[in-house]
Amino acid sequence: MSEPIKTDVLIIGAGPVGLFAVFELGLLDIKTHLVDILDKAGGQCGELYPEKPIYDIPGIPMVTGQGLTDALIEQIKPFNPQFHFGEMITSIENVGDPLFRVSTDAGKIFECKAIVIAAGGGSFQPKRPPIVGIEAYEEKSVFYAVRKMDAFRGKNLIVVGGGDSALDWTLNLQPIAKRLTLVHRLDDFRGAPDSVNKMRALVASGAMDLKIGQVTDLEGADGKLAAVSIKDKDGALSRVEVDCVLPFFGLTMKLGPVADWGLDMEDGLIKVDVSTFETNRPGIFAIGDINTYKGKLKLILSGFHEGALMAQKAHHYVHPEKRLVFQYTTSSTSLQKKLGVA
Ligand SMILES: Cc1cc2nc3c(=O)[nH]c(=O)nc-3n(C[C@H](O)[C@H](O)[C@H](O)COP(=O)(O)OP(=O)(O)OC[C@H]3O[C@@H](n4cnc5c(N)ncnc54)[C@H](O)[C@@H]3O)c2cc1C
C-alpha cells in the first residue's frame, strides 16, 4: 500500500460539477485532488455528448460538452488541481476530527479534511441491446456513444432507439453518413417532437431511411460488421448492409461503492442539507447529479450553485482558524491574485 496523499479536499468525480468545485474551493485557499473512474475529465459532457451543443449554461449561448469541459479545465488551472484518472473510490474512513482516509481500487490512499462527492450517476454504462454476439463488435463496429463524429463520416450507419439520444444522433450524423437508417421497434418516438418532425422530414425527402422493427442478427467477422437483419412487426426479415451500428437504449447508472459509505440515501441519491450540501456525515458533501433534495433539477447550473455553497462550509473544516469573508472576483484584489490576474 502506498504512502497517503495529503490534500485539503478530495473530490470524487471530475464531471463538470466536480471541476467547478475546484474553482469555488480554490478561491477560499482550499487545495484539491480529483479522482475519476474515466480516463479523462468531463463526466457525462465528455463521455456521452462531447460534440453536442448545450444551450443553458448562463452567459454562454452555446457550448459543446467537450467545449464546456475544456473551458472549466482552463478556468481551474490557477488552482493546480491534481487529477487521478482511471481509479474508483472504494472506501471512506473517518480517522480524525476532521480527517478522512479515502481509498481507490488501485491501492491509492488519500488523507483529507473534507470530501466532495460529485459522482453524477455513479459509473454510467450503456444498456446493451439483446442481440446475440454483439459484444464481439463493440468499440469496433458497434458504438454506444459518439466520441468523434468524423469517425462515422462516409459510412453506412444504423442508429437504433426511439428516445432523444437516438433522434439527436440521427439528425447530427445523417449529413455526414453515406446512408443512415434509424431502426425503432414502434412507429412512436419518445424524443422531442421537433426532432421527430425533422427526422420524418428527412425520411420523406429520401435523405435517410426509417425501419420499424428490431435488429435481430449481426453479420461480419473480426469485429467488423457487414450487415444486420431487421425483423419487422409481422416477423418479416430484411437485410441491411452496414459499417456501424449505434444503439441508444439508455444508460444504466451503476451507483457502485457510494451506496456503502454510510450516507443517507433516497432512490440511489444522496440526501443533503440545501444550505451547505453536506450529507449526514459531517465533512462529506454531495453536489451535482448524485444528490437529491426537494426541487432538485439535474442541470449543470444547479451543480455549480451547489459547489459555491459547499465551499463555504468546507472552509470551516479546512481552515477552522480563519474567518471567511465573502468577496466578489470583480472587486477583490486578493481573489484576483489567486486567479493570477492581479
Ligand atoms: C445527452 C445528455 C444531454 C444533456 N444536456 C444537458 C444540458 O443541455 N444542460 C444541462 O444542464 N445538463 C445536461 N445534461 C445533464 C448534465 O450532463 C449533468 O447534469 C451533469 O453532467 C452532471 O454533472 P456531475 O459532475 O454531477 O456528474 P457527471 O457528469 O455524471 O460526472 C460524474 C463523474 O464521477 C465519476 N465517478 C462516479 N463514481 C465514482 C467513484 N466511485 N470514484 C471515482 N469517480 C467516480 C464518473 O466517472 C463521472 O466522470 C445532459 C445529459 C445527457 C446525458
Image: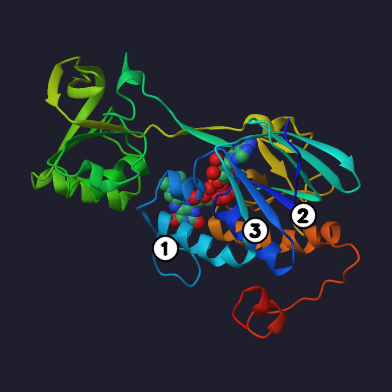
Q: Is the CB atom of the residue marked by disc 3 within 8 angstroms of ligand 1's nearest atom? A: no
- Picture layout, residue 253 above or below residue 115: above
Q: Nearer the viewer, residue 105 or 175?
A: 105
Distance CA(mark 1)–CA(mark 2):
34 Å
Q: Reading the chain from its start, which is encountered first: label 1 or label 3?
A: 3
Residue shown at 64% from the left, 64% from the top:
79
**Please, is residue 220 above or below residue 283 in the view?**
above
Ligand 1 within 8 Å of disc 1? The answer is yes
Between 284 and 39, the one nearer to me in the picture: 39
Quarter of the picture holding the C terminus: bottom right
Q: Quadrant of residue 271?
A: top right
Tell me the mark number nearer the camera, choosing from 2 and 3: 2
Q: Earlier in the sequence, mark 2 or mark 3?
A: 2
Q: Amino acid at mark 3?
A: Ala
Q: Which residue is mark 2?
A: 8
Seen in the picture, residue 117 relative to 232 is either above or below; the reply is: below
Amino acid type, callout 1: Tyr
Q: Are marks 1 and 2 in contact (CB under 8 Å)?
A: no
Residue 55: image tag? 1
Mark nearer the viewer, 1 or 3:
3
Residue ID for mark 3: 21
Please tell me how crowded label 1 is: few (under 14), some (14-19), or many (20+) other residues with Cα within 10 Å. Answer: few
Measuring 24% from the left and 47% from the top, which residue is drawn there?
Answer: 150
First reached walking from the N terminus: tag 1 or tag 2: 2
Mark 3: which secondary structure?
helix
Query: What whole-number distance in Å separates the C-alpha atoms at marks 2 and 3?
Result: 13 Å
Characterize the local packing of mark 3: few (<14), some (14-19) or many (20 or more) Cα atoms within 10 angstroms: many
Residue 158 appears left or right of 48: left
Seen from the viewer's position, the closer of residues 251 and 138 is 138
Q: Is residue 196 visible?
A: no
Classify residue 107 as left or right of residue 275: left
